[in-house]
């Protein structure tokens, strides 16, 4: 379903770009017009805000170019690419999902670390349960939630608990990081282990409890591009450059 | 039927397309299954707890649906006023509602800050979300309407003159319900129960939203399929095939026994 949707979206985007070109081509000579161009970007859900903003910025700077951003689970997106979904750029949360990509995936393009994210504990505003760190996830009088073992935020949380020697007793292991955070936002859970960027994105709905560096787990966000088309490289440069990095830092990411 | 065959190949082509749309995904599942390893794949540590939880919770859901749904269906089938129509419309909502929306609604009703959940939490310290009780509540929310509407249809078709005759012979409304409506509507009750049970077994959206996902506690078989698809696709496929087999077996059993 999703690959079809992505293809359809790309087709619609291309159509829109053609119409846009046709409508503003009017008086110019026409012969030197560039072909309509679409950059298809598949990005981890936690990058939604950053990539939406940067895609718009790129489109504004390059009229006629469409940057089509689809977000979802890093693993699911990588599987979709492996099954033939069209993609120029892939940005995942964690390097784990890279194994799902086809062999030699960056042969025609390249790969860089886009940014980093660290774990942080989301609690109710005002921290009514006085949650202070990892050990609170072993308290049985609280409802705590973690991401599922199969998604990056869940693996990172398990890693943090393992190295701290703590046995967490979660009430639930949610399917993705936003669902995990939502349980705290809705007041159903006392604490959730999510990423700092998710807490920044949630604004006043939750409060963050910082985990010290020595107990924390850093998650690398790999950026992969599959071709060297002009606008693929252009968008990659925007992401890795000052502008892109500033947007990411403002959203709670830790920089490259 | 014979006249149809003669007159319209288009009808058959469209009907065939309909069959293909339903059958192809199941065929795909069966073809991709590694039959030699199914038993091994089923040994994945999340599979058995998920199947057990699904069987227990759907059984409880079914019993509760029978207990509260049957009287409700009977009263609805005998109602003629506007109240009955409104009630029927209300019961139809969960059928057309996306299950995940149902999950949000359940959370806002029975959650710690919910309309019903908050007083319960304050009085008894009881928390419904993240418990097997929440799994059953989610299943009831989506499955009970299927049961009630199916049984209501069956009871509506029971001739009202039987009610009247029973009543003139001195039977109370409860007795009419138990001795007349129930036996006559039995095939409809079985069909409704099968439909509701299947719906409860497949419930995903409301469960994940309201009850969460924890192995052995709230992770039902559909949730386990989804989770293991990301880490252990073979286990997901094996579990899917098992659910397909259980569903077909139960429906086949019911059909063989009740409607021939």
Image: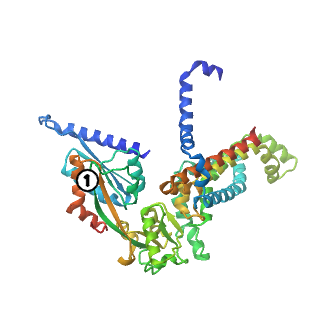
Expressed as whole percent of the image width and height from the top left, the position of residue B201 reads: 62, 53
The answer to which quarter of the image holds residue A111 is bottom left
Q: Chain ID for label 1?
A: A
* Residue A15 left/right relative to A206: left
Residue A150 is at least partly visible in this image: yes
* Residue B229 left/right relative to A201: right
Expressed as whole percent of the image width and height from the top left, the position of residue B72 reads: 69, 52
Residue B87 is at least partly visible in this image: no
Residue at the (38%, 58%) spot, across then down: A45
For this rendering, which residue is in front, B238 or A151? B238
Local SS, label 1: helix
For this rendering, which residue is in front, A75 or B34? B34
Quadrant into which the N terminus of chain B falls: top right
Residue located beneath label 1 in the image = A56
* Residue A80 left/right relative to B62: left
Expressed as whole percent of the image width and height from the top left, the position of residue B228 reads: 52, 56
Expressed as whole percent of the image width and height from the top left, the position of residue A158 reads: 46, 69
């Amino acid at each position: 379903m999703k690959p079809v949707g992505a293809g359809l979206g790309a087709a619609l985007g291309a159509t829109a770009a053609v119409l846009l070109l046709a409508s503003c081509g009017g008086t110019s000579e026409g012969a030197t017009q560039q072909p309509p161009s679409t950059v298809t970007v598949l990005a981890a859900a936690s990058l939604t805000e950053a990539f939406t903003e940067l895609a718009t910025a790129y489109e504004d700077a390059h009229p006629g170019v469409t940057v089509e951003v689809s977000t979802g689970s890093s693993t699911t997106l990588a599987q979709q690419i492996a099954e033939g979904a069209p993609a120029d750029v892939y940005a995942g949360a964690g390097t784990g999902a890279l194994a799902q990509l086809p062999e030699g995936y960056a042969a025609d393009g390249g790969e860089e670390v886009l940014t980093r994210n660290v774990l942080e504990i989301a609690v109710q505003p005002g921290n009514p349960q006085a949650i202070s760190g990892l050990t609170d996830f072993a308290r049985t009088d609280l409802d705590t939630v973690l991401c599922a073992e199969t998604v990056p935020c869940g693996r990172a949380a398990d890693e943090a608990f393992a190295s701290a020697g703590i046995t967490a007793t979660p009430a639930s292991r949610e399917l993705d990081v936003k669902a995990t955070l939502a349980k705290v936002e809705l007041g159903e859970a006392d604490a959730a282990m999510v990423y700092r960027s998710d807490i920044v994105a949630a604004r006043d709905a939750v409060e963050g409890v910082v985990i010290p560096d020595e107990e924390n787990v850093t998650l690398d966000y790999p950026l992969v591009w599959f071709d060297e088309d002009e606008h693929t490289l252009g968008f990659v440069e925007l992401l890795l450059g000052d502008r892109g990095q500033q947007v990411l830092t403002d959203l709670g990411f830790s920089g490259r | 039927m014979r006249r149809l065959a003669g007159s319209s190949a288009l009808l058959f082509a469209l009907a065939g397309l309909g069959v293909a749309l339903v059958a192809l995904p199941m065929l795909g599942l069966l073809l991709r299954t590694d039959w030699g390893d199914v038993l091994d794949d089923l040994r994945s540590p999340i599979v058995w707890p998920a199947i057990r939880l699904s069987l227990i919770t759907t059984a409880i859901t079914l019993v509760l649906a029978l207990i509260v749904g049957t009287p409700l269906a009977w009263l609805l089938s005998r109602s003629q006023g506007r109240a009955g129509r409104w009630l029927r419309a209300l019961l139809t909502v969960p059928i057309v509602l996306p299950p995940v929306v149902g999950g949000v609604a359940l959370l806002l009703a029975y959650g710690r800050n919910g309309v019903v959940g908050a007083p319960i939490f304050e009085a008894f310290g009881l928390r419904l979300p993240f418990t097997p009780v929440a799994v059953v509540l989610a299943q009831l929310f989506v499955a009970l309407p299927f049961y009630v509407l199916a049984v209501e249809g069956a009871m509506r078709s029971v001739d009202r003159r039987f009610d009247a005759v029973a009543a003139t012979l001195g039977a109370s409304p409860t007795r009419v319900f138990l001795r007349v409506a129930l036996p006559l509507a039995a095939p409809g009750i079985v069909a409704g129960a099968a439909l509701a049970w299947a719906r409860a077994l497949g419930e995903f959206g409301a469960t994940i939203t309201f009850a969460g996902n924890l192995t052995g506690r709230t992770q039902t078989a559909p949730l386990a399929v989804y989770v293991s698809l990301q880490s252990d696709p073979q286990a997901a496929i094996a579990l899917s095939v098992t659910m397909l087999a259980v569903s077909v077996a139960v429906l086949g059993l019911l059909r063989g026994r009740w409607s021939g």
